[in-house]
Image: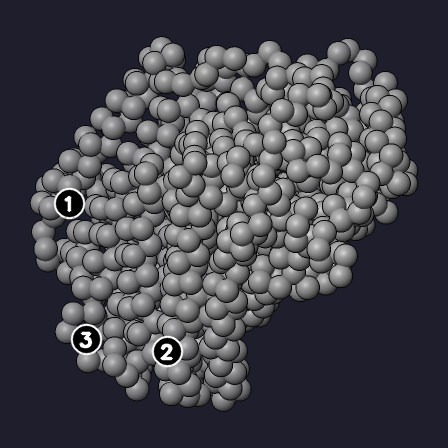
Amino acid sequence: MENQKFYYDNKIVKLFLLATIIWGVVGVIVGLLIALQLAFPFFNFGLEFTTFGRMRPLHTNAIIFAFVGNAIFGGVYYSLQKLLKARMFNDTLSKIHFWGWQLIIVLAAVTFVFGISTSKEYAELEWPIDILITIVWVIFGWNMIGTLVKRRVQHIYAAIWWYLATFLGVAILHVVNSLALPISLIKSYSIYAGAQDAVVQWWYGHNAVAFFLTTPFLGLMYYYLPKAANRPIYSYKLSIIHFWSLIFLYMWAGPHHLLYQALPDWAQALGVTFSIMLIAPSWGGMINGLLTLRGAWDRVRDSAVLKFYVVAVTAYGMSTFEGPMMSIKTVNQVTHFTDWTIAHVHIAGMGWNGGLVFGMLYWLIPRLFKTKLYSEKLANTHFWIATLAILIYAIPLYWAAITQWLMWQEFTPEGFLAYPNFLETLTQILPMYTIRIIGGTLFLTGFLLMVYNLFKTMATGSVEANEAAEAPALVLQGARNPLSETVHRWMERRVVRFSIWVFIALAIGGAVEIIPMIFIKSNIPTIDSVKPYTPLELEGRDIYVSEGCYTCHSQVVRPFRWETDRYGEYSKIGEFVYDHPYQWGSRRTGPDLARAGVITGPMYKNAAWHYNHFMDPQKMNEQSIMPNYAWFAKNEINLDMVPNKIRAMQTLGVPYPEGFDKIAVDDLMQQAQKIVDDLKVSNIDIEPTKQMVAMIAYMHKLGKDISPPPIEIVEPETTEQTQEIELLSGEEDLAAAKAIFTTTCVVCHGADGKGIATFPDLTDDEWLTGSSPSQVYQSISNGNIAKGMIPYKNQYSENQITQLTSYILITLQDENSK
Amino acid sequence: MKIVSNLLENIEGIQIYYIIGLLIFFVLFIVIFIRTMKRPNKEMEDIKNSILEDNDAEKIVTS
């Protein structure tokens, strides 16, 4: 057979690797910024463009799609050509792929900074960018399959199956999850609502982990690990079995992100079952990776590349054990909504993805540039710094998760929440957030060492853009000869048929999860009292969505006593039928807001409180880490878009009356005026068209429809105060009261009791309902709902309220008189 | 308001999705497992080693 001459395209590999390095630095720096923001709210800089809510999606997207994405493409383009002994199918497609992907990244960064976001985690980009992603992704697949078709080897090596699964998996996930109804170039509504949206989103979210962070990396592992170790992969049979099991099982597991939430039991059980089963194929990959190094461990001591691979594969094994454990319901109640998830993803992200990328770069760049690595010692230093960084990052967060969870669910002997104020549970873990910053800084330091080392390496060599090679042409075998060829072997050389089988394996799991959720009506029992959002509330919701409030606030109360006591009635599936998109969130850095509008509930705050809190959260409570949103009082809502939004909602099946779009603006102005009037009572002047008004309306809508109608507020009957209160002047009592006062009461009355903004001064002689001990006791006990004070008898025991009364009437009055 | 729970029982035939899905998985798993295990080791070795047979392998610098 005559040899054919051809050229490998090394230039495209170089471009992708450079992009990997540059976006990696950006992604890690933004990560460090948001870590700083969580410990020190100053780092939100008081600007709307740099709040945590906007920066967090920037970090996750930059790491996943820019850093990891470019690394995948670079790694695939190099190994695919070598494995298939063929140049990439088409140079133009390669170029469009590269530049298109960079354009997407830049557009993503710009839109996030400007608050353009769909708020679907890891799919926050708006519809025009989603379409661009689809086009570029198809070009990637086309280029890859084209290369497979013109290959010069018979067999398609294991790594490439993973690449194919990646292409197909992401294509299915991205298209299904991104379906939305656009109302302008920068705004769309998800076509799914509430629980359906949640299922589709986490089917996507979970499988983005599978098909963007796992399958392509297993593919890279199957090529680069044997190459670096100069040892063949441990077991090829294992690679076949774990490939098919893994791609089949992953698709089913999405609902484990929604345990105890407003989702049918069957869907939760499905997610749990398949998550546990996933341990086996995942560990198949880990075992195959680690055992490849058998007999080569002496080389691990010296080689930074192999060290990074060992950490990567080990982190993969740990994460894929931890993940299934986290999807067991009892474990999940601890790990969900706490920092456990954040630690988990960083073990996987920094260890598995980071480790493989670093190892690959240290191995590939010297080869590409036909030179030696500038400094092996520096690479080893990077390894140790990065490994240490992962531990310093993750351990404090595991600690923080357990601490916060224990605090959330602790009750006093009297049966009240021990820490009724959410902020207490957060303040407790802020030191852990500070330690995390050290972890992040170390990781960045290591990363920069690598950048220096690699650029120095590049300077000493040069890339041969078109590397000459030769190989005999492939003679396609005809039909399968049953004697000499097994079915699998035959299938592997039929790339298109192979892809179709992969597609089917992927589609089954997704179909089982999604079809019943969307097409079986009885899945979503409707609740009659739940009404669509008014135009003003919808505006507020859109602001909530675009600001990324979901990054810190959940909107789903799980059916635990420690949640219902803290927030109110647990969430029902039928409450969310008009939510396009859903806003359940995944981490509670702030309290859950699902019951923020339940007037008699523990989460309710009046309009003046919300106004003051948005303007300056730290004024309301020094320890708060929420960024301020003062521009809500300046920025206008766009009234022109209101009718469009209503019509879009109608298209999506929200039952607004016919022709409501025409009167929507009037409706909005009427409701806004009521809030403006309410604020005026507290001496706050604001125009009805400001974003602040819409946000307050939205806060007051949350949970309102399922709460009993507000009871007539009865002024406390002064005659009924038969209960005499003895003030408790003991030091212990006053100290206990001070602890409660400084965590709960300060939010409105200030640390010195003189009142914040329009909230009453407790140290002067003006008392709305009298200042005798029993009258103050009654005021605390029953609250004043009209003024925004909730009845504290639901949160504190009689003794604690007596202590508080004493603290106000003894300590505060004393301090004031000094 | 009626508390919505045990939805699994309220949806007729929902368990069929489970059963079919699991059946497909286990049948395929067994078939793939047996077929893979029956493949000759020699063939597997050849494929495994094929990726190391290019110039890259000789250039490996370990320290």
Q: Nearer the viewer, residue A486 or A341?
A: A341
Instruction: From the image, state whether disc 2 or disc 1 is nearer to you.
Output: 2
Cβ–Cβ under 8 Å for marks 3 and 2: no
Q: Is residue A676 above or below residue A294?
A: above
Distance (Cα) linking label 1 and label 3: 27 Å
Picture coordinates of residue A19, whole percent (x, y): 56, 67
Q: Residue at x 50, y 27 (%)?
A: A570
Q: Which is nearer the N-term, disc 3 or disc 2?
A: 3
Cβ–Cβ under 8 Å for marks 2 and 1: no
**In the drawing, does residue A798 fall left or right of residue A127?**
left
**Scheme of image coloration:** one colour
Quadrant position of residue A467:
bottom left
Picture coordinates of residue A128, whole percent (x, y): 68, 42
Q: Residue at x 15, y 35 (%)?
A: B30
Quadrant position of residue A695:
top right
**In the drawing, does residue A219 fall left or right of residue B4?**
left
Q: Is residue A323 above or below residue A81?
A: above
- The three-letter amino acid code for the residue at tag 1 is Thr
Q: Mark 3 — on which chain does it sit?
A: A
Picture coordinates of residue A195, whole percent (x, y): 51, 27
**Residue on which disc 3 sits:** A296
Picture coordinates of residue A721, whole percent (x, y): 66, 25
Q: Mark 2 — on which chain does it sit?
A: A
- The three-letter amino acid code for the residue at tag 3 is Ala
Q: Secondary structure at mark 2?
A: helix
Q: Residue at x 43, y 41 (%)?
A: A412
Res. B36 mark: 1
**Residue on which disc 2 sits:** A384
